[in-house]
Image (spheres, rainbow, N blue to C red):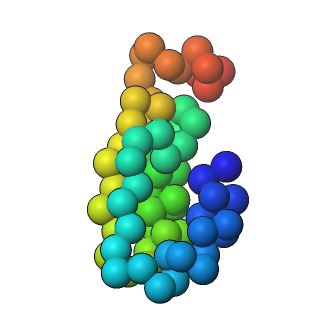
Amino acid sequence: MAFQAIARLEPELSTADAAILVGDLTNFGDPPDAFRVIEAARALCPHVLAVTGNLDMVSAANSEHLGT
């Protein structure tokens, strides 16, 4: 989902001075998944500030959603 949003925003991101990504970059993903989203945004806009959300951290609380 995040990659589709980044693709839709390509015209704006490619001309922006900076991008701010806030929370829930993934849907129950792990840190490498969140980094992939950040890198996809950086490919279009080199200055990215990203803040992870509660769905970006694998934990005991949400591991049942991941089937682990």
The quarter of the picture where residue 42 lies is: bottom left
Q: What residue do we see at 54% from left, 32% from top?
A: 28
Q: What residue do we see at 44% from left, 62% from top?
A: 38
Percent across and percent down for residue 47 are 32, 76
Q: What residue do we see at 36% from left, 60% from top?
A: 20
Q: Determine if residue 59 is in view.
A: yes
Percent across and percent down for residue 35 are 44, 58
Pick the residue in front: 56 or 22.
Answer: 22
Residue 30, above or below 66: below
Q: What residue do we see at 49% from left, 47% from top?
A: 25
Percent across and percent down for residue 1 are 67, 49
Residue 37, above or below 54: below
The quarter of the picture where residue 67 lies is: top right
Q: Position of 32 compared to 8: left or right?
A: left
Residue 1, above or below 47: above
Pick the residue in front: 5 or 12.
Answer: 12
